[in-house]
């Protein structure tokens, strides 16, 4: 597949990518986020008739030991990666794929109502307005840890059943996260375990001044996501990985099972987390139709993604190559093949790294030129 006349930007200095393995950043947000009105990569694919539908979709695998960490499809969705129907919600602002979210609740306690959200593969945690996330963490019994700048919970003396479910209502559908889907457990039996809440606070506002939530990877591991440009909407459906749960150490959650396989359902911290990171990388690439040439686009606020970058993290340098990273924000990619509906599919491997907020990308030197056809 050859995408013609694609504009590239060369970044000689990036913030927040230390330790990441990637070849570049592929922006998948709306054109309004480009720096000089460049046509984003996906828009070029669509306008040049290279994909059957103006849709891209993501499946993220929460099992970091799996051979395949996920899948990005250009031109459609993959029914084998989700179950049930897709719930669609109209985009409210064409920038970061922002949409209205009816409510957030902990058990039967309402935390937020009539708010906004974006889905972002480049954000590991689930980020929300400070007051709301503080209330949420308080409701699950989490306490703030200044050293990690995350909230921790007591998983050594509390049973798993003492933790409530978290419910996000989008449209008229509820998307539920169970305890082991929103608790991030680090360490091991010998060194000891620490259990973190994946909910992190940040008062991000959109162009209308509204606070919004960022549904990052811990949400997207459980819910397949679809981004439909032609109909200006975002869709979610229960992922085939919804019921996958991490193995839990025998010293944790007394009186509860040490492994896990909760039931089915549907549906991502209180400071501004810095360290930690969890990313999706890619592997090999091959194409089916037309020649080759993977391309990437530059947005004004790089960090591929459905949203803009904002963070405090580390620094790193890199130069873009011909195998860009993919996603609604930071997922790295390479493997390209077409699906049964002539869509382009990218396999994402499951390497771990944790990003608390959208990748902050700074272009200090830029060279822009179209690709020779």
Image (spheres, rainbow, N blue to C red):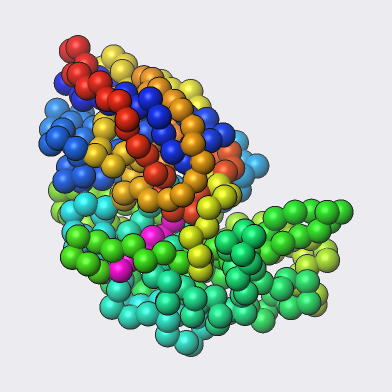
Q: Residue lying furthest top in this view?
A: 372
Question: Is residue 41 placed above or below 239 in the rendered structure?
Answer: above
Q: In the shown orientation, is residue 225 left or right of residue 312?
A: left
Question: Is residue 157 placed above or below 213 in the rendered structure?
Answer: below
Residue 239 visible in this rendered orientation of the protein:
no
- Based on the picture, tell me whether residue 212 belongs to the magenta stretch: yes
Residue 102 % position (x, y)? 31, 76
In this orientation, which residue lies closer to the viewer: 174 or 276? 276
Q: In the shown orientation, is residue 206 left or right of residue 86?
A: left
Residue 209 % position (x, y)? 22, 67
Q: State the count of labels.
A: 0
Question: Is residue 103 placed above or below 231 in the rendered structure?
Answer: below
The residue drawn where x is 46% and y is 28% is 317
Residue 301 visible in this rendered orientation of the protein:
yes
Q: In the shown orientation, is residue 258 left or right of residue 48?
A: right
The residue drawn where x is 59% and y is 42% is 352
Image quadrant assignment for residue 157 = bottom right
In this orientation, which residue lies closer to the viewer: 345 or 214? 214
The residue drawn where x is 49% and y is 46% is 313
Residue 48 % position (x, y)? 14, 28
Residue 321 % position (x, y)? 38, 20
Q: In the shown orientation, is residue 163 left or right of residue 321?
A: right
Q: Residue lying furthest right in this view?
A: 190
Question: Is residue 147 placed above or below 332 in the rendered structure?
Answer: below
- Based on the picture, tell me whether residue 76 belongs to the magenta stretch: no
Image quarter of the N terminus: top left
Q: What stretch is highlighted in magenta?
A: 211-218
Image quarter of the C terminus: top left
The residue drawn where x is 58% and y is 78% is 140
């Amino acid at each position: 597949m050859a995408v013609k006349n694609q504009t590239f930007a060369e970044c000689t200095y990036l913030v927040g990518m230390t330790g990441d393995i990637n070849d570049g950043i592929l922006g998948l947000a709306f054109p309004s986020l480009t720096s000089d009105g460049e046509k984003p990569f996906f828009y070029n694919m669509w306008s040049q008739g290279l994909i059957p539908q103006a849709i891209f979709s993501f499946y993220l695998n929460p099992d970091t030991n799996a051979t395949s960490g996920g899948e990005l499809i250009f031109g459609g969705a993959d029914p084998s990666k989700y179950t049930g129907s897709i719930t669609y919600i109209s985009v409210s602002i064409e920038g970061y794929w922002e949409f209205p979210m009816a409510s957030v609740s902990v058990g039967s306690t309402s935390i937020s109502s009539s708010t906004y959200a974006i889905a972002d593969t480049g954000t590991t945690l689930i980020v929300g307005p400070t007051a709301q996330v503080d209330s949420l963490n308080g409701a699950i019994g989490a306490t703030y840890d200044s050293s990690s700048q995350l909230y921790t919970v007591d998983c050594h003396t509390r049973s798993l059943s003492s933790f409530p479910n978290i419910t996000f209502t989008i449209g008229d559908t509820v998307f539920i996260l169970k305890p082991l889907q929103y608790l991030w457990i680090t360490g091991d039996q010998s060194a000891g375990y620490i259990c973190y809440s994946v909910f992190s606070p940040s008062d991000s506002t959109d162009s209308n001044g509204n606070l919004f939530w960022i549904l990052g990877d811990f949400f997207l591991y459980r819910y397949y996501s679809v981004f439909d440009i032609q109909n200006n909407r975002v869709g979610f459906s229960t992922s085939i990985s919804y019921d996958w749960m991490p193995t839990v150490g025998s010293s944790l959650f007394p009186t509860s099972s040490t492994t896990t396989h909760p039931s089915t359902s549907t549906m991502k911290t209180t400071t501004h987390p810095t360290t930690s990171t969890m990313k999706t990388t890619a592997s090999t690439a091959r194409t089916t139709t037309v020649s080759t040439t993977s391309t990437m686009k530059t947005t004004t606020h790089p960090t591929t993604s459905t949203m803009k970058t904002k963070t405090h993290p580390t620094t790193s340098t890199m130069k873009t190559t011909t195998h860009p990273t993919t996603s609604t924000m930071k997922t790295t990619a390479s493997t390209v093949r077409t699906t049964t509906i002539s869509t382009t599919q990218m396999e994402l491997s499951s390497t771990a790294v944790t990003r608390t907020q959208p990748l902050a990308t700074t272009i200090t030197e830029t060279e822009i030129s179209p690709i020779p056809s």
